[in-house]
Image (spheres, rainbow, N blue to C red):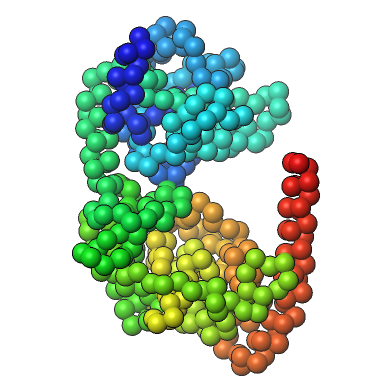
Amino acid sequence: MADKNHDIEQQEWLSGVAVLLIKEQGLEYLDVLRGLLDRYGFNVLCDVSLEKDQQHALYQGIDNSPQPSINNREDISGLPVHFLVVHDVYPVRQEASSPDSPERIDNLRLLTVKKKITYKANHEYSKQEQYDPVDLTCNATQVFKYLSHIVPQQIDEIRQTALRYNAAFRTPYPVLADLSKQVCRAKVELVDFHGTEAICKTFRPGRERYLEREVRARELGASLPEVSRLLEVGPHYLVFERYANRMERILSPRAPFSPHGLLPIWTIERVRVVILHYRRLGYECIDLNPEDLIYDPCQGLKIIDFEFLQPGPDEIETLKGNYAWYAVPSRFTGDLPLSAPQSSYGERWFPYTGLPRSLCLKELPRPVLAMVRSVALVPLALGGLKRVSWQHIQRFVRH
């Protein structure tokens, strides 16, 4: 049996595949679950309702065997009634056990999705009434067992699709360094591009719409020097010109206890120009934030990320209400980032501008803005002190 399990673990195509079993009480959240899976980078390979005989096979063939502790088999919601097979081309590995998952799990993204859907299903229930709407597999051995019992006739198709997705996600050029963060939509790497260092952004299969937005942003913003330049457009990847980022050199002044200084006023003026440029063309710079800005001493200010550039309600001649500095309206039906804040400006921009949002909407003399910023250093310093003090308390408690 151990040799058989070892053989399964060695099948490369299974490494990013997982099975999710939805209980009857969780069916009303099935669309929410599919949305979460999409936002966290998963592709659904199989999506079926379980027949009575399949539930029986599931119970007889699988549920009588020992299960990982993260799957609550004794909750009141009964047997699973829906079956999802999902695939992740960039699974987040767990090397050791944790309090949340004493058993090793092959992809920590699964735990994140499970926690979010469980919270969504239980947020109105008391502790005694709460239930587990979804079970999931932890490793390739479990995945293969579930596939063999429920959809044996589809295993080859699932395998071929997983292999195709993995191939599409391979970096087309030699990788020099991995610069990726969450990789929910794409991975970012420093590559050797025909003998020159460049940035390659490889998108997950099914996320081509984000690639198309990056390309569209360069077409619409060709006249803006701040828009980073594309060197190559591939079917699943983009290659960008690499810039030397020396942003820390120009962030000034810096409030005491603050992790960074303030953006120069001229950079705020240029950001205003960029946002307004796209608004006049009917587009919104959703998710534009200071971390998307870099400063190259030779080429100046650059904006590097336009994945969420999307059409707005109309062509608009004002900055008021723009989706980079204001909360995105609830009526908006496009894509939003995982970390979409309720108020983009206060959380993301004020610590870098030191200016009330209202003063960033208009062209005002720089001396006036500099004077306002000098006053803003006080709340920024207090916020930094509060954060430092809390970190100090946490370190004291831990030790």
Q: Is residue 332 above or below residue 315?
A: above
Q: Quadrant of the N terminus?
A: top left
Residue 110 seen in this snapshot: no
- Quadrant of image for the C terminus: top right
Where residue 202 sits in the image (x, y, percent)? 31, 54
Identify which residue, 10 or 51, lies in the foreground. 10
Residue visible at 57% across and 89% down in the picture: 363
User: 334 or 59, which is in the foreground?
Assistant: 59
Q: Residue at x 28, y 47 (%)?
A: 169
Residue 196 point in image, percent of width and height: 26, 67
Q: Give the answer, above or below, for where 71 lies relative to 296.
A: above
Residue 89: x percent and y percent?
34, 41
Residue 228: x percent and y percent? 36, 73
6 on left or right of 114: left
Residue drawn at x 63%, y 63% as measured from the top left: 347
How many marks overall?
0
Left or right: residue 270 compared with residue 128: left
Task: Determine whether 50 is above or below 244 in the image.
Answer: above
- Compared with residue 80, is residue 274 higher up or lower down, i.e. above or below? below
Locate residue 233 relative to residue 390 in the image: left or right.
left
